[in-house]
Image (cartoon, rainbow, N blue to C red):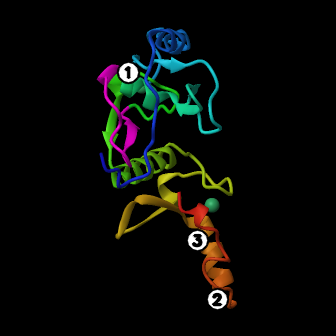
Amino acid sequence: MIRTNKPRFIPEMTPKAAARFAEKIDKTPGQGPDGECWIWTASKTHLGYGYFYLSGRQAAHRVSWEISNNAKIPAGMFVLHSCDNPSCVNPGHLRVGTPKENVEDKISRGRHERQKRTHCPRGHEFTEDNIRRRPDKPHQRECKICRRAYNSVYRKGASYPSAIPAGDLA
Ligand SMILES: [Zn+2]
Ligand SMILES: [Zn+2]
């Protein structure tokens, strides 16, 4: 077999290891957006992804996908969450995706998170009167108070984007 990508090798899952894996999952109903997330209860990364030791540290959701599909994840591929819940290991919420799909998933999740914000990063409320939307980026909300502040600085010669951080585009 010729491997063109660096292999992401997860060793054979023995029944004993599978039992150890299953012990770390909380399947209590009501978790996650559809109430069916299975939450990893052992160690997690700072982003909330579970991990599991099986000849080295493995991402728990990837191990879960391999157990339920009885297959290796193809080299270079990602396992994505349909529930946007990093600590979920429910195989029904996991699918294999390309690196490009992984990036698109992250972008849409970030956009979703921003839409939930009620204030700009400087604390001005996102009332309909205080929101400006650019025609080319209709999903981005810009704070008008900050925009006015930026414009007044800009006229004095400050360069974009130092005058106003990109984080102010919520
Ligand atoms: Zn889930
Ligand atoms: Zn603002």
Q: Quadrant of residue 43?
A: top right
Quadrant of ligand 1: it is top left
Q: Which residue is mark 2?
A: 155
Tag 2: residue type? Arg
Q: Are there few (<14), some (14-19), or many (20+) residues within 10 Å of tag 1?
A: some
Residue 38: assigned label: none
Location of residue 146 in the rendering, given as x and y in whole percent from the top left corner: 62, 67
Q: Which residue is mark 1?
A: 67
Asked if residue 33 lies left or right of residue 86, the reply is left
Task: Find out if the beta carbon at label 3 lies less than 8 Å from the nearest ligand 2 atom.
Answer: yes
What is the secondary structure assignment of the residue under circle 1? Answer: helix
Tag 1: residue type? Ile
What is the secondary structure assignment of the residue under circle 2? Answer: helix
Q: Earlier in the sequence, mark 3 or mark 1?
A: 1
Verify CB contact (< 8 Å) between mark 1 and mark 2: no
The magenta stretch is 67-82
Who is closer to the viewer here, 79 or 36?
Answer: 79
Examine the structure image and report whether residue 19 is included in the region drawn in magenta: no
Residue 147: assigned label: 3
Identify the image quadrant of the N terminus. top left
